[in-house]
Image (spheres, rainbow, N blue to C red):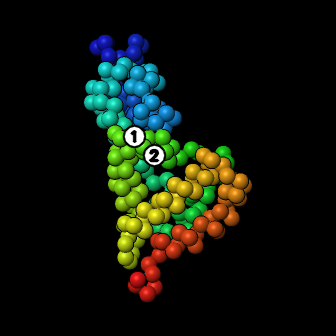
Amino acid sequence: MTGTETPGRRRNAEQTREDVLVAAVAEFTAHGYATAGVRQIAERAGVTAMMINRYFGSKEGLFEAAVERSFAPPTVVGQDEADLAGSIASRLAARTAAGSEVLDPFLLMLRSASDPVAGPIVRRGIEQHVGARLTDQLRGPDPDARAELVLAMLAGTWLMRTVLGTDGLRDVSEERLAELLRPALAALVEEPSDGS
């Protein structure tokens, strides 16, 4: 044993890194960048804080890896969608329904976006992953602005429906919410027929 591992744990660099990353996503999602501590992350992962620094260099480096892990996989916006507005609307309605799996990227964004260190990292994560995925699928003028308006609509719907739990959005069925969202999303994602 090297002194950087928890007793009884065999060293496996890849698994250790994965355990730390899973623990970091959980801590940053629950507490935000400023409040989540490296010691708590290390404890959750079953390693020492020194081991985290060895793999990720710093808390900031670990946060960057956690953002990458959280934002890279498609959750609501997929790729090469035949009915992009309909697909996004259906996924958002399902992912924000009562009892659905928590959307870690949204919580990570919500709890860390205002931090001066974490905010730019979150912004880059959004732009490089879901933002790029969406922008690449948009035809017509202003794809970047339209993509970010879609993302703002998604984040706002998620916030109002799951975090605040406002009556109108909390109580509407998945099917009806998808029906209501689709035309609003279509206005942003579908190429205008007149080219403007």
Q: Vertically, is 70 above or below 144?
A: above
In this image, 98 relative to 82: left or right?
right
Element assignment for label 2: helix
User: Where is mark 1, residue-wise?
Assistant: 115
Among the 4 quarters of the image, the one containing residue 21:
top left
Dividing the image into 4 quarters, which one contains the N terminus?
A: top left
Name the spot of residue 183 as percent of width and height, x first. 58, 73
Of circles 1 and 2, which is in front? 1
Marks 1/2: CA–CA distance: 10 Å
User: Where is mark 2, residue-wise?
Assistant: 109
- Label 2: how many Cα within 10 Å (few below 14, some 14–19, many 20+): many
Could you tell me the amino acid type at mark 2?
A: Met
Dividing the image into 4 quarters, which one contains the C terminus?
A: bottom left
Q: Vertically, is 141 above or below 102?
A: below
Q: Which residue shows up at 59% across the image and 62% down it?
A: 90
For the question of whether residue 19 can be seen, the reply is no
Name the spot of residue 48 as percent of width and height, x first. 36, 19
Q: Vertically, is 72 above or below 116?
A: below
Could you tell me the amino acid type at mark 1?
A: Asp
Name the spot of residue 193 as percent of width and height, x first. 46, 85
Among the 4 quarters of the image, the one containing residue 146:
bottom left
Q: What label does residue 138 carry, if any?
A: none
Which residue is at the front of the view, 107 or 79? 107
Q: Which residue shows up at 40% across the image and 71% down it?
A: 138
